Amino acid sequence: MSKLVIASFAEFEGHIGKELGISPYIKITQQQINQFADATLDQQWIHTDPNRAAQSQFKSTIAHGYLTLSIVPYLWDQIAEIHNIKMLVNYGIEKLKFNQPVLVNSEVRLRVILQSLVNLRGIAKAEMAVELEIKDNKKPAFTATIIFLYHFN
């Protein structure tokens, strides 16, 4: 799978309203979940106790919703390369909705559509509709509008 390469604001602008791509799948492991729990101090048993979680409605542990959200920059990087920028800033998240839990060992991927791109005095404000798909599941883990600021050269 080749990445989308964008070299300028004008090229980026040509993608408004279009799907920018879909990342490869990655597996969410118990080790990742445990490390996220340690980093965020969120040790809720549904994430970290496989034996207890096996008795739950999910029949296994589930990833933290914010863990699944935190992999967006990594997955976005698998989809596109934006050239000629000085800096990229995570600016915001709007309309975030967690739709479906991600069970341990599930595979997820990101689908991205460029909703809008605005030039703010040399800084490109990109609003992207994102959906984290779960392999073999009709409902996505979450949907949101992610906002990045690109400082082009």
Image (cartoon, rainbow, N blue to C red):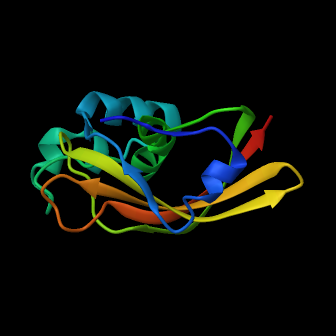
Quadrant where the C terminus lies?
Answer: top right
Q: Is residue 148 visible?
A: no
Quadrant where the N terminus lies?
Answer: top left
In the picture provided, is 121 more to the left or to the right than 142?
Answer: right
Residue at 18% from the left image edge and 67% from the top image edge: 138
Residue 28 position, x and y percent, is: 27, 38
Question: Foreground: 140 or 79?
Answer: 79
In the picture provided, is 111 more to the left or to the right than 59?
Answer: right
> Which image quarter: residue 27?
top left
> Which image quarter: residue 58?
bottom left
Question: Foreground: 80 or 68?
Answer: 80
Question: Foreground: 34 or 141?
Answer: 141
Residue at 63% from the left image edge and 38% from the top image edge: 7
Residue lying at the far right of the rendered structure = 121
Residue at 12% from the left image edge and 56% from the top image edge: 136
Residue 105 position, x and y percent, is: 18, 39
Residue 32 position, x and y percent, is: 33, 31
Q: Is residue 14 visible?
A: yes
Q: Is residue 110 above or below residue 32?
A: below
Residue at 47% from the left image edge and 64% from the top image edge: 18
